[in-house]
Image (cartoon, grey):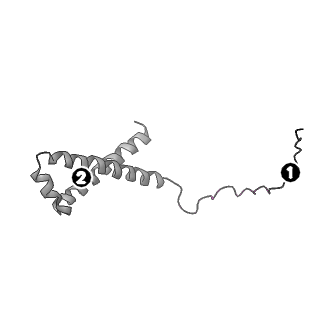
């Protein structure tokens, strides 16, 4: 398996685990009376599943972005080529007028 695909799959798993912990804490702490709403509704499991999936999307994306950004060179790298910037000078261009 390519390294990039493995990195992506690992970060998706980490994001899903973080999502499960987050939704579990939301339900356990009964934020906004969420546990009562989910447990008293016959389709409460759908709400929990949607919370898990959508939070997993967010947390996986953030986790993957952090992993990619940490792959950069450490602080104090080569800093680029320091090539001189060309000066801007006006150039005369002839424009023929129509009659």
Q: Taking 3 as reference, is 77 left or right?
A: right
Q: Which mark is residue 91?
A: 1
Classified by dominant secondary structure, the portion drawn in magenta counts as loop
* Image position, residue 22 (x, y; %): 25, 57
Q: Which residues are magenta?
A: 74-87
Q: Residue at x 40, y 50 (%)?
A: 64
Pick out the residue farthest to the top: 1
Residue receiving disc 2: 20
* Image position, residue 8 (x, y; %): 39, 44
Q: Which mark is residue 10?
A: none
Q: Residue at x 21, y 46 (%)?
A: 49
Distance (Cα) linking label 1 and label 2: 63 Å
Whether residue 76 is in magenta: the answer is yes
Whether residue 14 is in magenta: the answer is no
Badge nearest the viewer, 1 or 2: 1
Q: Residue at x 9, y 52 (%)?
A: 40
Quadrant (top left/top right/bottom left/bottom right) for the N terminus: top left
* Image position, residue 55 (x, y; %): 30, 51
Q: Nearer the viewer, residue 56 or 45?
A: 45
């Amino acid at each position: 398996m390519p390294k990039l695909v493995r990195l992506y799959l690992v970060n998706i798993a980490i994001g899903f685990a973080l999502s499960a912990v987050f939704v579990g804490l939301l339900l356990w702490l009964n934020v906004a009376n969420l546990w009562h709403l989910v447990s008293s509704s016959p389709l409460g499991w759908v709400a929990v599943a949607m919370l898990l999936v959508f939070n997993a999307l967010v947390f996986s994306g953030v986790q993957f972005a952090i992993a990619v950004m940490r792959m950069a060179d450490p602080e104090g790298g080569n800093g680029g080529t320091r090539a001189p910037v060309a000066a801007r000078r006006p150039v005369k261009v002839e424009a023929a007028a129509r009659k």
